[in-house]
Amino acid sequence: MNSSLYQSFKVMESNQQTTMTSLEVVELINRFRLEEGNETVKRHDVLLRDIRNELKILEQVGITNDHNFVEVNYIDAKGEERPCYQMNKAGIMQMLNKE
């Protein structure tokens, strides 16, 4: 991962665990896309759909989430509560590898 990109995101260290929200991950994906010359923007709702689909697939094959993806909420610019996911490093890498 480009260190300048990585450092531009708020990465939380919690009990020696790196976490990011799905909002931060979608921004990271879009920055990677721009660096590669791809101007297609991935929307947060599309990433949420991808995460939910991934969780369904894992459940179908008997693999538990292991806290890679924890559904949480955030307050958007309109003051409305919206869903997002808090992801640990394994969850982040799982979604980045799908790109």
Image (spheres, rainbow, N blue to C red):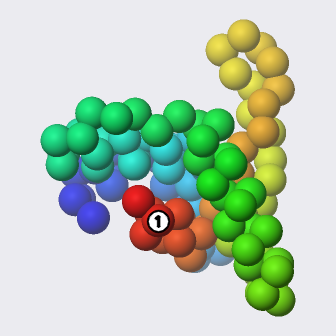
Tally of marks: 1
Residue 15: image x %, image y %?
Answer: 65, 74
Q: Quadrant of the N terminus?
A: bottom left
Q: Which residue appears at 43% of the width and 69% of the height?
A: 97
- Looking at the image, residue 68 lies above or below residue 20: below
Say whether residue 78 is left or right of residue 2: right
Say whether residue 62 is left or right of residue 25: right
Query: Quadrant of residue 79 in the image?
Result: top right
Say whether residue 48 is left or right of residue 6: right
Q: Quadrant of the C terminus?
A: bottom left
Task: Say which of 5 and 7 sits in front.
Answer: 5
- Looking at the image, residue 36 lies above or below residue 79: below
Query: Quadrant of residue 60 in the image?
Result: bottom right
Q: Residue furthest top?
A: 78
Task: Say which of 15 and 74 sits in front.
Answer: 74
- Looking at the image, residue 59 lies above or below residue 30: below
Tell me the amino acid under the disc marked 1.
Answer: Lys
Q: Which residue appears at 82% of the width and 78% of the height?
A: 59
The residue that label 1 is drawn on is 98
Residue 21: image x %, image y %?
Answer: 61, 49
Say whether residue 27 is left or right of residue 60: left
**Is residue 14 something that shows in the picture?**
no
Q: Which residue appears at 50% of the width and 50% of the height?
A: 25
Neighbor class of circle 1 (other Cα within 10 Å; few <14, some 14-19, many 20+) is: few
Q: Which residue appears at 56% of the width and 76% of the height?
A: 90
Q: Element at badge 1?
A: loop
Residue 8: image x %, image y %?
Answer: 33, 44
**Is residue 57 something that shows in the picture?**
yes
